[in-house]
Structures are given as C-alpha cells and as structure tokens.
Amino acid sequence: MSQDIVTHCPYCALQCGMTLRRTADLVQVLPRNFPTNRGGLCQKGWTAAELLDHPDRLTTPLLRDRPGGTLRPASWPEALDRVVTGIRRIQSAYGRDAVAVFGGGGLTNEKAYALGKFARVALGTRNIDYNGRFCMSSAAAAGMRAFGVDRGLPFPLADLGTADTLLLVGANVAETMPPLVRYLVEQRERGGTLIVVDPRATATARQATLHLQPTPGTDLAVANALLHIALAEGLVDKDYVAARTSGFDQVRRVTAGYWPARAERLSGVPVADLEAAARALGTADRAIILTARGAEQHAKGVDTVTAFVNLALALGLPGRPGSGYGCLTGQGNGQGGREHGQKADQLPGYRRIDDPAARAHVAGVWGVDPTLLPGPGVSAYELLDALGTDGGPKGLLVFGSNPVVSAPRAGRVTDRLRDLDLLVVADFVRSETAEIADVVLPTAQWAEEDGTMTNLEGRVLRRRALRPPPPGVRTDLALLADLAERLEHVDGTTLDRSRFPAAPEQVFAELRQASAGGTADYAGITWARIDAEDGVFWPCPDEAGPGTPRLFADGFPTPDGRARFLPVEHRPPAEEVCPDYPVYLTTGRVLAQYQSGAQTRRVDALRRAAPNAFVELHPDLAARLGVEDGDEVLVTSRRGEMRAPARLTPTIRPDTVFAPFHWAGAARINSVTSDALDPVSRMPEFKVCAVQVRKAPVDERHEGTS
Ligand SMILES: Nc1nc2c(c(=O)[nH]1)N[C@H]1C(S)=C(S)[C@@H](COP(=O)(O)OP(=O)(O)OC[C@H]3O[C@@H](n4cnc5c(=O)[nH]c(N)nc54)[C@H](O)[C@@H]3O)O[C@H]1N2
Ligand SMILES: Nc1nc2c(c(=O)[nH]1)N[C@H]1C(S)=C(S)[C@@H](COP(=O)(O)OP(=O)(O)OC[C@H]3O[C@@H](n4cnc5c(=O)[nH]c(N)nc54)[C@H](O)[C@@H]3O)O[C@H]1N2
Ligand code: SF4
Ligand SMILES: [Mo]
C-alpha cells in the first residue's frame, strides 16, 4: 500500500511542486506539475527525502554538562528545564535583551511568525534577527524605498519566458534554480535576448546572448552607464517617467558622470557590450531586469539594486505587462520569512516595530499592552558579533540557520558563539553550530509537519505532512509552545498554552489577523484557497477577493502613488586589492550543495556530485602563482584562511578567485570573507574581499582563524 501527498521541495525559493510517496519501507520524491517548475526538479529536490530516515537524524535532545565537555543524550524535561533555567538566570542578571533569537528564511510562515512573537512576548527581548539579512536584505531595502513594497518578483515567474530582453545580474540560476532555466530556453526560442552579468562565465552566462564580465563589486557603475546610454540614445520612456515616478532629474544628473568609457575603466566591461546591453533593454517591448546575490551581497548592495531599479523605471518597465524589475529570492521561505516579524525592526504583515499603529494592532492580536513590546534590535551580523561581549547577549536560541559555516568572518562569529553562557540550537542534524551548543533540540523535518511557504513570486503555498515526526522529535512550533509556557512573559504572566498554539493551522489563522492591513496582507488567504488555486499571491486582504499576481499595474504603494528614483554613486568595495592581498575573492554556490551544507553534505548522491570545496582560478593567475589544477591552495585574507584544491578554468576573470561556501573546517571560505556591512540593509559583503592565494605547503593543516 502506498500513500501520496502533494507538497513542495524543502530547499530553495523556487519551491518546486513535488509528490511524496510513502510505501512500506521508503519515501519517494516524484516531480509534480506546478506553475513554477512545470514538472522539473533539480538533484537536491530529487534526493530530499533521503534525510528523513538518515542515520545522522537527531531523535533525542542533547546536553553539554560543562564547557568543554561533550554533548550527551538527555530527556525532553531535562533539556527544556536546562533552557528555561539558563534563560531565567541570564535575564535576571542582565535584563531581558540578554537572550537573543536567530531565525531562518527556511522556516514556514507559521514558524517565522511564532518565533517573532515568542521573542517579543515570551522572552521580551528586542534581540531577534535572522539569516535573511545575509540573503535578501539589500534588494528588500531598495524595493521598499523605490516601490513602497518588497516582493521579490512583482509578477509571475512565467513572464520570464515571454520577455524580449532579460537581464540577469549576479544570478547563476542554472545552478541555483535549475528548473527555472526552462523559461530562459523558452525566451531564447522566441528570439529573445538574454544578458548575464557575472565575473564568471557560469553555466547561466554560457547560455546568454551577451555576457558582461565585470570585476566583483562594480555592478553599480555598469547600471549607471546603461542608464547613461539609454538617455543619450533617447531610449527613456518620458511619459512613464512623468506620469508614474518622482526624482528623475537628480538621477539624470548623477548618471551623466557614467559615460561608457569611464564605466569600462571601473568595471572592465567593454563599451561596445554596455551599448549593446542598453539598446537591447531600451528597444524591447517586454524587458525584465532581475538581480540576485551577485549584485546584492555587497556593502553597497542597496545602492546597486537601486541603480538597476532606476534603469528599470527610466525604461518604464515596472507595472508594464510582461516587463519589470525583480529580485530572485533565495531560501525556501525567503519571501515569507521576511514578512512575519523575525526581523529586528519588524512586526507581522511587514510592519515596522517602531510604528505606534503597528504596535497597537499586533499587540491587540497578541493580547498584550503595546507599551510592553520591545523596540527594534540589531541586524544579524551585529547581533552575532556582540554575543558574549560586555553588554551583548549572553544567551542565544537558533532556529533554522548554521552560522558557524554561513556567517561572514565565521572564525570570529564562532568565537562569539563559544563565549555565550547558553547556546540552544533547534535542528534535525548536528550542524556545525549544533556541535558547539549547550543544548540541541531535535525538530521535525519538512515532510513531518504542515505549514505554508511564500515562494519567490509572493505566492503562498502549502507544505504538507506525510507522516508525524519520529518518536522523540518535536516540531519547532511545539517546542516554542513548550518553552513559552515555562517562561514569565513581558506582562508578568505565564501565558497558558493556548496563547502559543502548536497547531500550524491555528498559527496561520492568527498570522492572518496580525498581517491584516499590513503591506504583506494575508488576511484573505486560507489553506483551502491555497489548495484550490495553486497558491495565492499576497496582498490578499479579503477572502472573497482575488490575490495579486501582478503589482504596480495601477500605481505604487507609496504615499503619492509614484515610484521613487534615487541617485546613487559607484564606490569601491570595503576592501580593495593591495600588494599583500592582490586578488579579489568572490563566493557563491554549486548545484549539488545547499547553503551551509548541513543537510546536503549528508546526502550520498549530492556528496558524490560535489564532494568538497574548491578554489576556482584562471590559468594565467595559476601560472603566476605556480599552481596546477588539483593543487591544494591557501586563500588568506586579513581575517583568516581557507584551504582547498585549485580548479583551473578560463571562465573566471584573472583578477578574481571564486569559492563555494558549503563546506566547514579548513575548507570554510567564510573564515576569509569580509564583515563589512551595507549601511542601510546591514547585508555583509560576501561577494568581494581582497585575498592572497598560494600553493599550500605539503602536509600543512590549517584551521580557519578569526
Ligand atoms: N544549489 C544551490 N541552490 C541554491 C542555494 C544553494 O545553496 N545551493 N541557495 C539558495 C539561496 S538561499 C540563494 S540566496 C540563492 C542564490 O542564488 P544566486 O544569487 O544565483 O547564487 P550565488 O552563487 O550566490 O551568486 C550568483 C552569482 O553571482 C556571481 N557574482 C559574484 N560576485 C559578483 C559581482 O560582484 N557582481 C555580479 N554581477 N555577480 C557576482 C557569482 O559568480 C555567482 O555566479 O540560491 C538558492 N538556491
Ligand atoms: N561566503 C558566503 N556566505 C554566505 C552566502 C554566500 O553567498 N557566500 N550566502 C548567504 C545566504 S544568501 C544565506 S541564505 C545563508 C544561509 O546559510 P544558513 O543560515 O546557515 O542556512 P542553512 O545551511 O540552510 O541552515 C539551516 C540550518 O537549519 C536546519 N533547518 C532546516 N530547516 C529547519 C527548520 O524548519 N527548523 C529548524 N529548527 N532547523 C531547520 C538545517 O538542518 C541547517 O542546519 O548563507 C549566507 N552565507
Ligand atoms: S530548484 Fe530549488 S525548489 Fe526546485 S528542486 Fe531544486 S532545490 Fe528544490
Ligand atoms: Mo540566501
């Protein structure tokens, strides 16, 4: 006998539709025809069920009895007691803000919402933020300031297939969202032009009509130059600019300084290619501009995205059918995860925590006095950087992230985590962060609980449980409820368990109320509707009314209904190359591994496909360094070093090396990366820093340092 459920992949923001089939001894993944993936899955999706019954799966809490001791199995009462006693001790000595929470963009909407409420009501701490700060925050901030709303794609994904010109900036979708490539193929078959901007000739760039290969961190100059050329050649949509936008004059003045030859000097992209790209965009009926992490993970990520938004507005794209600007959201619930209150400055519905009306509304739903809700906390890296320091948090609860591997300047972050009085990690495997925790709480996996996810299009989807969690394992919602009922809340009460429900559908009902009237309004979305309609796009304020697949057709949700141009200037990366550190390092992903690798490094087929880290370098650079293909190299920055085999390829710029961030220990590239932050989004500069590369002495074994 077999049982089937329809659900979505546990990994990235494409949230491919899949069917899970359970037979007597096996859980099998079958592809499913959903409007985004149309039956396609990548290797990670195909193998996702392998982790459900994996021998590394945690089925009991783990405790460390003393610093430096080992983790040992413990009972739930003992583990919960240890967490609650630890929290009480820290908060009575140092105040409520001394316990912090770190969430994740992979958590369901229900969990992200419950985590934010848990932090503000049960812990009463202002210190909560999440890994989306490392991922989405620059595009989110730029979208907010230009359009008054942040929804990754303001149109359905299928629009990509009908674009005459498509510009992908710092997105390697052939490896990061493979089923999306079908839209690029469709676009090309219709005779469309695909332009890819990437310092590497990636699998995506190799499919492009035109590949612009800038030095890392120079996209802003490229974008301003494209607008400069569009202006010079009369390609700007003057009627649109006059009717639907504000602030163009200042932008026009700034882009006057980005004549093509200057942009070529700054970015390395030839003038002829800049001109060809500007013309292809400016003469297309339907043009789409998309950014991803390559453009965004910079200390000027917000301004870089703004430069591409300026270009899109000048060409009249946002709100025009089949055209627009969008950002490719990354994590499974990267979109929903940034809407429901796990951000330091945020309450559910994408409301601001410092807005009195928002506080009153949400406090009403939560049944507490608004004055008792904490104010804004600090961003993810600043939070991690302050752990265990004087005045910084002394306790941290982690749900859905593995910062020991994925945080910038990870050697320092690991030291900070080790200095905590209490580190609690909820996970289903012993991630590198769980390895150094005081308490590890085993949680359910995706196929073991119901919930909703919001994909990269802003489409709210249903994730379904195929089976209950294994014995000994609790869901994140259940363990938040377990902790909440043991803690004294901000209003001095111990709230009864019904105030922190563990049933996801009940949490969703509350989330709908809390989001009602906010920017990301889910009030009209029900689980039944999601099932009936192949997902529902927010905003959807009314159960009787439709969702909103396309935004901006009639105006922008800004006070005057107009989109805002903002002048932005190119500036160098936080760290420039110099004689000691003469090479640029950039980082990113490979197809077969996901994020910190905690999940995918445990899947046999994926480990075989991508067994280890590597350092990609151009043969000319390798020759100068005396390095041959396969030689172990050391990559060193001012912050630390990483060691991995060299992979020689002519597809990368000779002034730049690339390494993926999925591996730990000596191969952890985040030992090297920069912790420079964008001033607005607080996004770290993962995509560029200055390094030295040399052949590793034989037998030298190095660990990353801080
Ligand atoms: N296989 C796989 N897929 C994933 C993930 C994963 O870990 N593995 N993670 C998911 C998540 S959370 C995210 S955020 C997305 C990320 O998806 P992408 O943004 O597509 O992934 P990255 O590899 O981080 O970066 C994309 C490209 O940016 C280029 N790049 C580096 N520096 C620059 C620069 O200065 N300018 C420009 N223009 N390009 C630059 C890199 O060479 C790289 O090819 O992927 C999602 N999908
Ligand atoms: N150098 C470099 N560093 C980067 C990037 C880069 O491009 N370059 N990209 C950054 C980006 S875009 C991102 S998104 C981050 C991601 O990096 P991380 O935040 O580390 O993301 P994951 O590896 O997905 O970590 C998720 C952890 O939570 C667990 N987990 C998964 N689902 C759940 C759940 O529902 N509940 C609980 N309790 N646990 C769960 C997993 O087993 C895993 O251990 O990395 C960032 N770091
Ligand atoms: S593209 Fe993303 S959602 Fe689709 S199968 Fe691969 S990892 Fe899963
Ligand atoms: Mo991400």
Image (tube, helix red, strand yellow):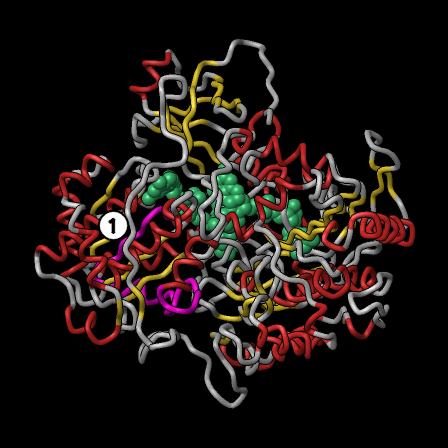
Which residue is nearer to you in this view: 148 or 373? 373
Give residue 133's position: percent from left, percent from top.
Answer: 53, 51
Say which element carries label 1. helix
Is 202 on the left or on the right of 227, as rendered?
Answer: right
Q: Which residue is mark 1?
A: 223
Quick check: is 165 in the magenta stretch? yes
Give residue 504's position: percent from left, percent from top.
Answer: 70, 70
Q: Residue furthest bottom?
A: 544
Q: Does residue 503 sit above or below 697 in this rendering?
A: below
Quick check: is 696 in the magenta stretch? no
Q: Residue furthest left?
A: 233
What residue lies at 8% left-to-right and 56% top-to-bottom?
233
Q: Quadrant of residue 71?
A: top right
Question: Looking at the rendering, in which quadrant would you find the C terminus?
Answer: top right
Which residue is nearer to you in this view: 32 or 437? 437
Which residue is nearer to you in this view: 196 or 256? 256
Query: Mark 1 is on which residue type?
Result: Ala
Q: Does residue 223 sit above or below 613 in this rendering?
A: below
Mark 1: few, some, or many residues within 10 Å (few <14, many ≥20)?
many
Is 96 on the left or on the right of 581, as rendered?
Answer: right
Magenta region, residue range: 146-171
Give residue 315's position: percent from left, percent from top.
Answer: 20, 64
Is 516 on the left or on the right of 184, as rendered?
Answer: right
